[in-house]
Image (tube, rainbow, N blue to C red):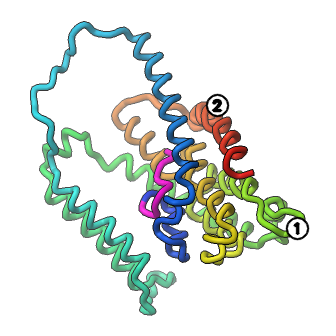
Amino acid sequence: NVGGSLTPLGDPPLFLGFLKGVDFFWTAKNIFPETLFIVGALLAIFWLIDRHYFRREGVLPVDPTPDTHRLGFEGAGNFALLLVAMGLVLLSGIWKSPVQFDVFGTHVGLPGLVRDVGLIAVVLVSLWFTPKAVHASNQFGWAPMAEVAKLFAGIFLTIVPVIAMLKAGADGPFGAIVQAVTRPDGQPDPAMYFWATGALSSFLDNAPTYLVFFNTAGGDAALLMTTHAATLAAISAGAVFMGANTYIGNAPNLMVKAIAEDRQVRMPSFFGYMAWSGAILLPLFVVQTFIFFL
């Protein structure tokens, strides 16, 4: 899952950047070539792999499942609900309000609260509105979501001390990493930011990792979008692209695994997945570094 790199709606790290002042279309303008390279290369590799296995399986002389229905959508009203969900997310980033609420010891702003309540309402409306036959046809179930929710709850609980150590900067336990992303002249090194953000995004959640390195680079959105645009592009690309290195790098990786296994489709183990991702993604990231970040 290396997509979602062009707008804040595509991936949580970019949404955090949007909340910090990065323009909505900044990433679309500044890492489009990087996205085109990595997505194009992966599509080509996937096509070659698929072609190989297709030839091994052999071609059936007659399609056993001929199309008998016209093309269309069932439950198409959910597209409208998807637009509502997108609008709620955008609203929470654009709407500024001083009103805050204490929710179990956490200060939650009014825009964020409206967004979260609205998204829950969208889910309930969708469940009520969508015919049960559509859910059955899609083999819809809660088990994959419950599995992902439990795992990421554990990640977010255990990530707290790691993020605190990263925030400690050059004087903290991860001081070597913080120092590595800065050149001897004090200027940020985009290539090192790409790999440092990406490496930690592979094993921590990529959203808080993005935020840590965003702040390490100065945390000034206006400066990062202009003078240090290459650095912000490297942080954005590292967080979004390298989350694909492991199942836990970003939620969709694990969700696909959980859905597949729920439908009795065998999936690679955690390290088995990393063997595939390492063999395919890491060489592409090396090439990408030389093309875009050096």
Magenta part of the protein: which range? Answer: 1-9
Of 79 and 126, the residue lying toward us: 79
Q: Quadrant of residue 100?
A: bottom left
Q: Residue at x 45, y 87 (%)?
A: 102
Q: Which residue is mark 2?
A: 279
Q: Is residue 40 visible?
A: yes
Q: Nearer the viewer, mark 2 or mark 1?
A: 1
Q: Position of residue 248 (x, y in %)?
A: 55, 49
Magenta region includes residue 287: no
**SS type, badge 2:** helix
Q: Is residue 172 above or below residue 259?
A: below
Q: How many marks?
A: 2
Disc number placed over residue 250 in the picture, else none: none
Residue farthest toward the bottom in the current orientation of the protein: 98
Going 22% across and 56% down the picture, which residue do you hit?
79
Instruction: First in sequence, mark 2 or 1: give its number.
Output: 1
Question: Mark 1 — residue?
Answer: 185
CA distance separating discs 2 and 1: 35 Å
Judge the density around disc 1: few (<14), some (14-19), many (≥20) Cα neighbours within 10 Å: few
Taking the view exactly as shown, the residue that stands out farthest to the right is 184
- Residue 7 forms part of the magenta stretch: yes
Residue 230 relative to residue 7: left or right: right
Answer yes or no: do the residues labelled 2 and 1 have beta carbons within 8 Å? no
Q: Amino acid at mark 1?
A: Asp
Residue at left 36%, top 73%? 116
Q: Position of residue 46 (x, y in %)?
A: 48, 29
Position of 192 relative to 58 (above/below): below
